[in-house]
Image (cartoon, rainbow, N blue to C red):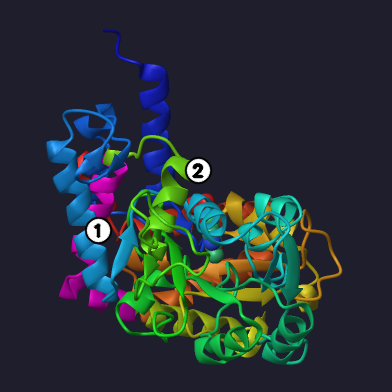
Amino acid sequence: MMHDSLVFDLINKELERQRHGIELIASENFTSLQVMQAMGSVLTNKYAEGYPGRRYYGGCEIVDQVEQLAIDRIKQVFNCEYANVQPHSGAQANAALMLAILQPGDKILGLDLSMGGHLTHGSSVNFSGKIYQPLFYGVEKETGLVDYAMLEKVAREEKPKLIICGASAYSRDWDYARIRKVADEVGAFVLCDMAHPAGLIAKGLLSSPFEHCHFVTSTTHKTLRGPRGGIILMKKDFENPFGLKDPKGNIRMMSNLLDMAVFPGTQGGPLEHVIAAKAVAFGELLSDEFTVYAKQVIENAQAMSAALVSRGYQIISNGTDNHLMLIDLRNKNISGKKAEQVLGKADITLNKNMVPFDDKSAFVTSGIRVGVPAITSRGMKASDMEFVVDAIDTVLMNADDEAKLESVRKKVNEFMAQFPLYPELG
Ligand code: PLP
């Protein structure tokens, strides 16, 4: 068969791009080589609709063991009773969760997208805002912290069926107990979408949502440092409150409803090659090495935040408890869009992001989101954050000076040579 040099040349170019640049997209990371090898394995050839031990296809004896390993390991990581490792993505995990517990038109309450929430938490352009009736809470203007009083007020007035916590651009820890309290009062379920900080929660470095939230969903490719994908977890299984019974007349457990909502509810065959890669990543997550990594992520984020503040940058909520921060660029007279563009010219990758109460559109924005999971995986320490922030600052303060941008790019490329990425790939 002809070697597809067109595609593989592009893959090699992307490897070089990842090697040379400073990756600050908060939702990205570099998986281990083992994770990628599992993903690129023969398991991609296998159909396995169903779950381990109960499949609709023959020949599943081995993938059953792979999937069971992934389930057992992630349950061990978070000390929880139930895990579904089949969602193809974080969005799919949230879609399945909502399908399992909501009816079309039910009210859901989540953090507003423009305040740091995620599309799947009720945005009008997403299934969650089209199928269900979305309600939102925000962050406080003065502090940038989640406005729990607003959350409670909306919950009490509107009585949603589901309250969603978790975010895509929020740098502080959450008060899960407070959310559960009002949820119990109004008869709502609580979902924590921990996609962003999951790896830090896994190591006990942030509050755990498991004690207080009925359901926890996550992506597996951010701070968890696995392959792209999703998971659904429950600390404790419980009888479904909808009176649904199985064919033998037994009340179905929530775990049955969730499994059914993933397959056949929202997906067909699971991606067993990705599930194998999840199993590998979850094994890595259990290691002491990952504890060191997760602690370093927080140290690096705090060092970066301090270095930015010392150069006059405004961080929403004045700092970070996790792996990311949101920078309001309004006092620097540059939009998020332009900042993303010019930093890209210097091989520094991040994304523009609306800041709370932004007066610019989502296509322009007043801010940028910065995260350290990927550069920490490259081996950077807190002392390296000075270089990174200096490079960002030089670019933003000289945004129209092409020669300056080019000189920063050269320095960035030289700097990154100290942190080899996938040397085994040649
Ligand atoms: N939930 C949150 C909080 C996220 O930040 C994201 C991704 O950015 C998702 C869900 C969706 O994940 P995916 O891109 O895998 O669908």
N-term-proximal mark, 1 vs 2? 1
Q: Does residue 359 sit above or below 246 in this rendering?
A: below
Q: Does residue 289 show up magenta in the picture?
A: yes
| Residues shaded magenta | 273-295
Question: At 70% from the left edge and 84% from the top edge, which residue is drawn?
Answer: 151
Q: Secondary structure at mark 2?
A: helix
Q: Does residue 406 sit above or below 253 in this rendering?
A: above
Q: In this view of the protein, which residue sits in the foreground, 293 or 96?
A: 96
| Amino acid tagged 1 | Ile
Q: Secondary structure at mark 1?
A: helix
| Residue 98, percent from left and from top | 56, 58
| Residue 257, percent from left and from top | 43, 56
Residue bearing mark 1: 71
Give the Cα separation between the discs numbered 1 and 2: 19 Å
Question: At 24% from the left edge and 78% from the top edge, which residue is drawn?
Answer: 292
Q: Does residue 52 sit above or below 46 in this rendering?
A: below
